[in-house]
Amino acid sequence: MAEARQGQGAGSGGGTADPGLRLLLDRLAPAPRLAIADVGANPLTPPPYAGLLAAGGCTVFGFEPQAEAFAALPQTETERYLPVAVGDGSEIALNIYASSGMTSVFRPDLAAMDWLGKRKRWGTVLRTVQVPTVRLDDVAGLEAIDLLKIDIQGGERAVIENGPRLLSGASAVITELRYYPLYEGEPMLHGVDAVLRAQGFVLHRFLPMSARALPNSQSSRLNLPRMRDQLVDGDAVYIRDPARGLTDRQLVALALLAAGVFGSHTLVLNCLDRLVQRGLAPAELPSAYVDLLPARLRSEGGT
């Protein structure tokens, strides 16, 4: 759901490369330009990889079936978008909601939305259209990816199940997970988690989450933005399980993604240590990366 999240930020999102990412792009020579597949590229908010893209560290192959959202997306040398839906290859009934960020193959769970006090805002379906889908593995011109980002309101599981070839080479997946239902019959957190684990990924971290204050008779007396008690959804980062082995490309990609997309600094350093051991990174690079971290993240007694 494309709304403001609360919680810890996601690293370099917003379009500016931080010094640590710039260091890695310069010193992991030749640093590969990563390939990102963005399924559900509706530009309501900046994507988590905005900083990496701005630094010239990736190319994006995106998909957005909503006509107005697709028209707002750029087409550049590093960004290519298609007005198609990704799924299992069949034709789907796509429900176009009044709120663009809610559009989904699933119908609204009106009882659940009533509980949140959001039925009028979120639950209005304007029309339903028949839309063909393409399997992720069948997209022409998409030969390999390092990161899959998905936000398609309950359709994430179908994308993952139909992309095993591309996902076998990927280092990470950023996917929306639902904690409280918004749609009838949608896969919840456990449904998406199961298919990702089956393809060799493990949950690494949660990104900012969306939570709501529940309606009540005393709402006018409360500071509701500080009382968001009910978790609804949020993005999560899954990484290819390092305990099962990573190729050189996957290890470099994971270091760059951790630095430039989801801000996991100990993961960056773990990857750099492994790259040093493989002779693929300068021995001083982990220390140089720490030197560039904000002071609040470094030990006063460290060197």
Image (spheres, helix red, strand yellow):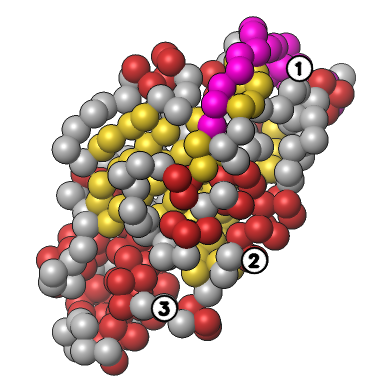
Q: Which mark is residue 246?
A: 3
**Which of the two discs, 3 and 2, labels the residue nearer the N terminus?**
2
Q: Residues within 10 Å of mark 2 (few under 14, many from 20)?
A: few
Label 3 or label 1, whichever lies nearer to me, is 3
Q: Nearer the viewer, residue 15 or 185?
A: 185
- Give the amino acid at mark 3: Leu
Q: Which stretch is magenta?
A: 114-133
Q: Which residue is mark 1?
A: 119
Residue sitting at 70 percent across and 60 percent down? 194
| Disc 2 element | helix
Mark 3–mark 1 Cα distance, whole angstroms, equals 45 Å
Residue sitting at 43 percent across and 15 percent down? 67
Q: Nearer the viewer, residue 135 or 301?
A: 135
Q: Which residue is mark 2?
A: 198
Q: Quadrant of the N terminus?
A: top right
Q: Residues within 10 Å of mark 1 (few under 14, many from 20)?
A: some
Q: Nearer the viewer, residue 271 or 38?
A: 38
Residue sitting at 24 percent across and 73 percent down? 289
